[in-house]
Image: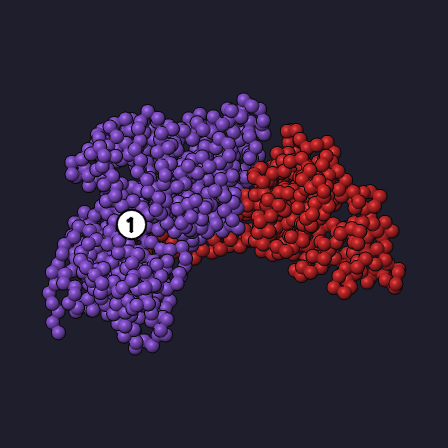
Amino acid sequence: MGIKKRKIIELEDAVVKFAGDSGDGMQMSGAQFSDTSAFVGNDISTFPDYPSEIRAPQGTIAGVSGFQVRIGSKGIKTPGDRADVLVAMNPAALKTNLKWVKLGATIIIDSDSFDVKNYQKAGFNSDPLEDGTLDGFNVVRAPITYLNFTAVKELGLDSKTAEKTKNQFAVGILYWLFDRNLEYGEKFLDDRFKTKPVLAEANKKVLRAGYHYAETIETLESRFQIIHRGERKGKFRNITGNTAVAWGFIAASERSGRPLFLGSYPITPASEILQELAKRKQLGVKVFQAEDEIAGINSAIGASFAGNLGVTTTSGPGLALKSEALGLAVITEIPLVLVDVQRGGPSTGLPTKTEQGDLMQALYGRSGESPAVVIAASSPSDCFDYAYMACKIAIEHMTPVVLLTDGYLANGSELWNIPKIADLPPIVPPIVPDNTPDFKPYRRDPQKLNRFWAIPGQEGLRHRIGSLEKEDVTGYVSHDPLNHEKMVRLREEKVQRVANYVPELKVWGEPTGDLLAVGWGGTYGAMISAVEELQQQGKSISLAQFNYLKPLPRNTEAVLKGFRKIIICELNMGQFAMYLSALYPQFKYLRYNKIQGLPFMIEELKRKFNQVLEGKE
Amino acid sequence: MITKNDTSSSQPVLTRNDFKLDQPVKWCAGCGDYAILSAVQNALPEIGMKKEDIVFVSGIGCSSRFPYYINTYGFHGLHGRAAAVATGIKIANPMLSVWIVTGDGDSMAIGGNHFIHILRRNIDVNILIFNNKIYGLTKGQYSPTSPKGLITKTSPDGTIEPPFIPGELAMGAQGTFFARALDTEPKQMTDIFIKAAQHDGTSVVEILQNCVIFNNKIHQEITGKDVKDDRVIYLEHGKPMIFGVEHDKGLVLRDFGLQVVRIGENGIAEKDLLVHDAFTPDIALHYLLTRMTYPEFPVATGVIRSFPCEPYDQALERQVIRSMEESRIKTLEGLINTGNVWQL
């Protein structure tokens, strides 16, 4: 049988979405396809989208697990708004994702799963394959369940195990569709099932079956090719935000010479930081899984008092529980980094979904005047840099630092240009030499205003610190009214002076113009993509994306002054807008807010910016 | 192997004065805390640690001001959280001698969760619980150890809550060391503190301490000079369980429970009495001894349980060291360049 020569469609980038039941292996399939794409030189950005139930009833909307990857020649900054290719393993997956698919997209479905019972369970009134729902799409109806069983039949697996390999059939189709070498996919499976060679073999068989199926069938009339521009140079790896945070901490520990201690309690979507660091004993990392959030942060404070780099990780509800102890780190002026991987709130809220709702909590959610440094990462890979900077600031300025990331950065991934650790900026802990004469625990550095670190075990520096207000310099307990006001102002000023040691706010585009789009943290990818697209259309728009939130960069006011209009875009009700309004009330701030547990889409940002530029806000 | 009691011969001999501060101590006149502070200052020179290797950690309450009054490293934390802070300190540096000073409210109420978990993990720290059965610093509300029926500012009709016995909780949480001391017995306190420091694992010492302002004489019915010998038994490892002014009363085990007997009555001789074994891993008898309350029984003091067991901090240190030795990856640079790395 001859294989038909297919048309090749060249693309700058393509978005592929894998969707199926929670147990269908969609996350693995996505990772496998992403890794292979990176291997062949594509830029990638991924975003998993999974429910908070571990295994919701099969075939239901609640049980749909998704994984989106965007592959492109270069400069991919988001996982993309809408899919060019959707893999839907059942009707529920189709139902949930159809609204996120481009018109004309290729939809690969397991036709075996589209019986009456299943499409009704997914909320379709009639068979979506027959009723016109999929008109305008290029639908590949593959009897995946049947073909999968056929492929693994000779291995004699039980039906439950055999069922688990069917995702590879869809992956095989994709490998053919994007002209991917099967060897990469097979290597991925060998690594994944290192200890279970039979499973590796079964998965590989199905992968190949899917590939050859695609090669043969008529419905696939064309293949895609991502244009290779070959402009990226260097050593890369795919990294998620949570892994990047963990590695940023290790880097800071190595560069500062302070052993790393993590005290933490598992919480979605932050647990992977704890899990990653728990695996790093070979690098001297000590991880303490505490009995609760409170013990997590208090143990980290204790470790920092004892001379370690104490860090703790959590999400919004955990930050609430940690707030008293964060205040303790403020008054004891101990280095501490707290990572808040934000998720939808309030309360338990949307554990697996992203949001930026914890800004005010991070800035102000403590008793008394309790200033802490607050910074935010803006992409999965720069979580490494900001985790590193958080530690550098915490140590050198003797202060707690809150690092805000979010579910989107934490679970999303992108290519990371692997740095040389020795090239990272140095971290110099302000440790007091042993037997320093007339040592006083609250004596300060005249420039930074930090106090100094005297560590138990050091000779001649015994001292006592704690949660009660301290007398300036001596650190004795003091209830003196004027001393209290002095200490409150000193702690605030110490935090403000951090601005002298961090980069200024960058403006993407002209420093003056019609519209300044303002974002902070994890919205960077969508914001820069939208702004750059409008800039290419000749629009007068620039972007300022904040990473340093407290203190704000020194040039903040100067940047804001340069534009006729300012719009602040946030995945919350406008917390950063409120903050900027309070600090720089002379400007008028437009707001664009989304509170759906989802990241911004590029197209919705562009639409809003265009409205504002046209005076139709 | 980490041993905290490595005394090198070149170390200077310390005295109680090494642990005194020139800062004023601000407890109420007549407070039992003064005697405990003094006993701790007497014990520390005997534990074989350099003074800069000792850390006192506390939470909130009258007892928790303790770190401000003793010349070691000190950390005064949050209400109930001293156990967590101390855990972090001990894991960060297992060579330190770490002490927690806490009260019945701080450890049994707001810090109850941390209390049971530090014991379950067996972190090698020493916990001194000042049990005065009342909230002192907040001026007189009942605590989780207040006897049922106690009238306080928040229980005007008497409490309707049964109290915790700290030792019962400690053993329920798999505690490896539990001792009870009286603030009126300085020598015994010092001796018990030294034994607590020598124990590998979490040592809990409950001190029956008098709050002179809000719960004065709460322990008087057992600690009063005139009655104490008949109402308290001081347990020592390897010795028969004897008490009483006349040294004629003892404890035996009958029908799955303890019983007080009199030597010379019903044919009972000293050899029939229980002999205290503090080091046995079996918790059953320790548990019964801990639960003894007046008037049915004498209250047990001394080291009731001291079962050596590898502490968490040492086990973790062992895992870390082994992992560092065995792994080919020695630096972060090595880690991030291992695995799926692409040269583009």
Picture residue at 80% right of the left edge, 45% below the top = B221
Query: What secondary structure is marked by label 1?
Result: strand
Percent from the top left, x then y, of residue A119? 30, 64
Q: Is residue A592 above or below residue B294?
A: above
Percent from the top left, x then y, of residue A467? 55, 35
**How many numbered marks appear?**
1
Q: How is the image coloured?
A: by chain
Picture residue at 45% right of the left edge, 55% below the top = B323
Quadrant holding the C terminus of chain A: top left
Q: Which residue is mark 1?
A: A414
Q: Is residue A450 above or below residue A272?
A: above
| Residue B55 shows up from this direction | no
Picture residue at 70% right of the left edge, 45% below the top = B159
Chain shown purple: that is: A
Specify the subunit that label 1 lies on: A
Residue A566 sits in which quadrant?
top left
In the image shown, does A92 or A179 lie closer to the viewer?
Answer: A92
Q: Is residue B172 above or below residue A204?
A: above
